[in-house]
Image: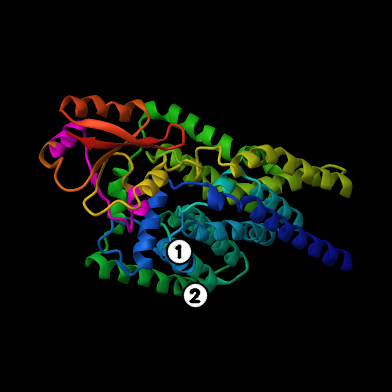
Amino acid sequence: MQKQQAAGSGQRAAILSVTAAAAFWRFPGLFANGFQADEALFASFARTIAVWQDPLLRLQPVDKPPLLFYAQAVFYPLFGPVEWAARLPDFIASILLIPLAALLAWRLFGDGVTAVLTAVLLAFSPLAIQFSPTAFTDPLLTTLLVAALAAVMGRRPFTSGLLFGLALATKYQAVLFLPLLLSLGAGQGWRREWGRWLAGVAPVATAVFLWEMARTGAFTLWQTQVSNYGGIRLVGVWELRPRLADWLALWRQGALVIGGLAAFGLVLIKRMGQKERLLIGFVGGYFLLHWLLAVPVWGRYLLLPLPLAAIVAGRALKVARDGLPLNQFWGWLVLAGVIAAQLPMAAAARDGRYSFGSYPGADGGAAEVARFLADAPYGTVLYDHWFSWQWRYHLFDKKVFVNWFPDADSLVTDLTVFAGKGGDRYLVLPNEPEGQSILPEVQAAGFQLNIVFQTQQTPGMSLYRISR
């Protein structure tokens, strides 16, 4: 008994140590990365709330529940208008995800070794690392869902319902986890407990409903999000192969070790129990759904099943180890091997070398251009086609008016009427063929374009002052 208690204490200490190492490893990303378009949009919502300009977001193009935006808004008065303030909710959530996933593994299998392995796999997963210092909805959503599942296994129905409600208030994709949550609750023998679970969900769901009614007078968030996706449809037969290749390539970049070990779990499935098979079936079903539905192939969608895949991978290692005559030394050697296998990719993710999540230069140089225009007077106009959401954030409290143009003809028409009237007019173009193709048409219409600023990023963007 004392040996078991000592082992449990050591395993808990190992999980806390891994969590601390993960926080230290990921911390530089808070200050190194740029905003992708969605991040900039969400952060602009948060700044609008924080300065009480539009606290209900009535005038904003919102298509998601608002929990993340209000969480971000809490940090702006504390730290000022810095990008990392918007990343703090996700950063904190991503660190908490590690012990929460370990707790879920422990409660599922009553096994501290699987819990430690789960924590190690998540801590050094490139996908988890690079999404930690971001302003997307998905890291917060993932943590809340794992916490809700852990509460189910801890026989805390009200807490689980409250956490699931908060997940729904972050993003509607939370409903994808409902079958797994219901299965785990049924496995726990829940009957009357579902009433308490619903009592936890109800106040959060009611708050989101009242918020949306106060904003628009109707509940339109779901319809707006589906419309922005272009609707939901099954993919065509001709799309199956390229989409599968894209998803596998993304998984290979972001979670190669976890994916490989989880696949190894299929080999050992006969030696696994019902809970392991449930997790494997859920992760497989999640992947099939995102393959067969015409949703974008984005890394953020792989973040949601990642903790469950890590639990399956950790369990596969534990089952394999138990089937071999290994002493404690060999057990530690296996753990060291798991860490070593992930370190090169984890180091690359820490430096933002993958295309998922956030990374240095994700904004294409918008922050640099915004700093150049920071002191521009009223009447200054910036013409843009590609970076509208970045300007919403970076020029949030500046005097520059951003004029979006759909094509070169529309730009020329506007310039023909307004150029030379009022303040300076600028055109920002990405340093890529698609962007540079605008130049000849504008110049052919009789306008002179002089480069006044170029970003240091590659390919980056160029800022032109327009004159007749």
- Above or below residue 203? Residue 432 is above
| Cα gap from disc 1 to disc 2, whole angstroms | 40 Å
Q: Nearer the viewer, residue 200 or 282?
A: 200
Residue 435 placement (x, y as % from top left): 31, 30
Residue at the (65%, 37%) spot, across then down:
260
Q: Is residue 10 visible?
A: yes
Residue 321 placement (x, y as % from top left): 80, 44
Q: Residues within 10 Å of mark 2 (few under 14, many from 20)?
A: some
Q: In which quarter of the image is residue 92?
A: bottom right
Q: Label 2 belongs to which residue?
A: 196
Q: Quadrant of residue 109?
A: bottom right
Q: Can residue 279 be seen in this view?
A: no
Amino acid on which the number 1 mark rests in the picture: Gly
The stretch drawn in magenta includes residue 404: yes
Say which element carries label 1.
loop
The stretch drawn in magenta includes residue 81: no
Left/right placement of residue 148 relative to residue 323 reads left
Amino acid on which the number 2 mark rests in the picture: Arg
Check the image and name the residue furthest to the left.
417
Q: How crowded is mark 1: few (under 14 residues within 10 Å), some or many (20 or more)?
A: few
Residue at the (26%, 70%) spot, across then down:
214
Total labels: the figure holds 2
Say which element carries label 2.
helix
Left/right placement of residue 330 relative to residue 91 reads right
The tag earlier along the polypeptide, 1 or 2, is 1
Residue 464 placement (x, y as % from top left): 29, 36
Q: In which quarter of the image is residue 217?
A: bottom left
Residue 80 is tagged as: 1
Residue 264 placement (x, y as % from top left): 67, 38
Residue at the (88%, 68%) spot, across then down:
2
- Above or below residue 433? Residue 352 is below
Q: Which stretch appears magenta? A: 391-415
